[in-house]
Structures are given as structure tokens and as C-alpha cells.
Amino acid sequence: MNYLLSHSTFPVTADLHTHTTASDGHLSPTELVDLACTNHVEILAITDHDTTLGYESVKDYAQQRGLNLISGVEISTTWGGQGVHIVGLNFDVTHVAMSKLLDFQRGARQARYHVILDKLAKAKLPISEAELLTHVGDGQIGRPHIAHAMVAKGYVKNINQAFKQYLGAGKIGDVKNGWASLADTVSAITDSGGVAVIAHPDKYKMTRSKTLRLIDEFIELGGRGIEVISAKQHIDITEKYSKIANDRGLYASVGSDFHRHVSYAPNVGQLPTLPRSVTPIWHAF
Ligand code: AMP
Ligand code: MN
Ligand code: MN
Ligand code: MN
């Protein structure tokens, strides 16, 4: 590792899971870096969905501001019949293995939003491509953008209702097919010099045995980390995943999954510090 953190002790203000307008976040990469500096974040990763363009656009600026910004990405995969997100950290963004994976995911996102728009049209909720694109910046298209378009069309009252009725797990707009496999995702992150991390493990609502199967397969494939702290969660959850991380020899990561300012979610870097029992992920950088 090439910077100070290798010698630092707890607590470190780290936030290794955040989003910008390069995917479905509401702050530009510059605004996010500014906010991280205001909040005294020491190590930040921008982990936009399936793109590193936000990180790349702000890398030099972060350095000017003295912020330790590492490369990051959040990859959508399908495993065990459901969506699982893998965060990649501290990899070479120019590596061919990563650009191939991101090209593939970009194609999958393009194909997916057309399928979702077709399904919505069949359910008498038409949204034209042009209408959708007014809600997308220059980044990756995701369901939150479709949710915004549904609100604008008056189909639903708010984003939450859009997910609850049409876009969330098991609903017509929950189109999972087409993502890279877990194996290809972990390989691309590892081959490009990074560390693969299971994102928000408690969000998948898996049984304990399915969670452990995911973790064991992930490790087999070369995965090395798990988010022990993700956004606002009960201390019991932190303890559960700390124990699993230690049992399985995984590094522990921490991230707000910040998308925008909301009362129910943490601000950038405003998270509990990792328990002392775990090995923080930056020891693997
Ligand atoms: P996608 O990347 O297209 O699969 O969309 C997933 C994204 O939708 C997540 O990363 C969240 O940012 C957002 N999301 C998921 N569930 C909800 C929800 N119930 N309300 C608002 N946003 C959500
Ligand atoms: Mn998101
Ligand atoms: Mn996610
Ligand atoms: Mn995320």
C-alpha cells in the first residue's frame, strides 16, 4: 500500500461505497468530493453502477484537495436467481479486463431499459425513450431514472411507489437477465489489480445458508471483502457480518451507499467505524 493508511490506527473515516451523477447519484463527482472533504473523510471510493467515469473525472481534483480517493465501481450481477452487487476497489481503471466488463455491463443496461420500457408499455404505462433520457445525465441508466420518468408522467406519486409497484424485486420492471456472472465480475476486478467486495449483504434478504453459499462461492472465485457496515444498519447486523468476515477470512469494508441527501440514509462518511475485531479492507490495497 502506497499511502499513510497502512500506518494509521483506528478510527479511520472511510466511505468506500458512494454514487454520483455518473450513475444514479444526485451529486456530481466534484460535489461528492467536496462533501467528503467537508465531512473529513480520509479515504473515499466512488462506486457508481457499472462505470468508472465519475471517478476518472474527479481523480485529479480529489488529489488537489488532499483527499485519498481510490478507484471503485459497483457491478450488478445475478447469482442464485437474484440480483447481487459486487463492489470493486482499488483497481487499474485502464486495465483491459475492467474495460471489457464495463463495456459488457453498459450493453446489458442499454438492452435492459428497452425491455423494461416495453413491459411498462404493455402495462399501459408508456414512456418513450426520449422521455426517459431527459431524466438521465451522461451516466449509466438504471431503474431510478425510470422511476423518475414514471413520476413525471403521473403514473406514480413518488420514486418509492414506482419501486414498490413496478420496479422493485419481483415486479414487472425487475429485469435481471443479462448481467455479467459473479465469476466474470470477480475475475475482472481481480485481474485489474483490485479487491472484490460483496456489497450490502443484508439487503438481499437471503437465508443464512444461502448467504454463506454466496460467500463461499465468492471466495472460491477470488473475492476478498464484504461490507460489514452498509448505510444505516442495526449493530446486530454489523456484528453478524463481522463474525462472518472473520470466520471466512474476508476483509471488512464500510460504505454509506450515498446517492443523495435524505433523512433516512447516512451522509458521506458519516458511518460508525469498523469493529476492532475485523481487518479493514484498506489493508488489502
Ligand atoms: P439498477 O441499477 O437499475 O438495478 O437500479 C438499482 C438502484 O435502484 C439501486 O442502486 C438503488 O439506488 C435504487 N433503488 C432500489 N430500490 C429502491 C427503492 N425502493 N426506492 C428507491 N430507490 C431504489
Ligand atoms: Mn443505486
Ligand atoms: Mn447496490
Ligand atoms: Mn450502491
Image (cartoon, helix red, strand yellow):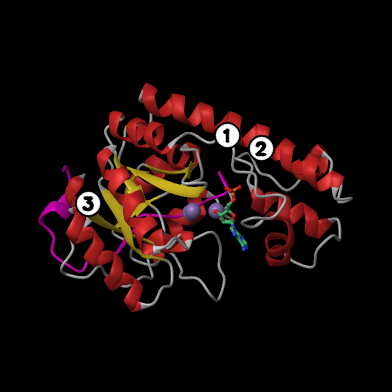
Amino acid at the residue labelled 2:
Arg
**Foreground of the two, 249 or 35:** 249
Element at label 1:
loop
Q: Nearer the viewer, residue 30 or 177?
A: 177
Q: What stretch is highlighted in magenta?
A: 1-23
Residue receiving disc 3: 282
Horizontal side of 53 relative to 155 (left or right) equals left
The image shows a total of numbered marks equal to 3
Dot 2 falls on a residue whose secondary structure is helix
- Tell me, for residue 178, which label it has, or none: 1
Give the residue drawn at x 31%, y 30%. Answer: 192
Where, quadrant-wise, is the N terminus in this rendering?
top left
| Residue that protrudes farthest toward the left in the picture | 7
Q: Distance between the residues labelled 1 and 2?
A: 8 Å
Q: Which of 108 and 138 is in front in this view?
A: 108
For mark 1, does the 10 Å Cα neighbourhood hold few (<14), some (14 to 19), or many (20 or more) residues? some
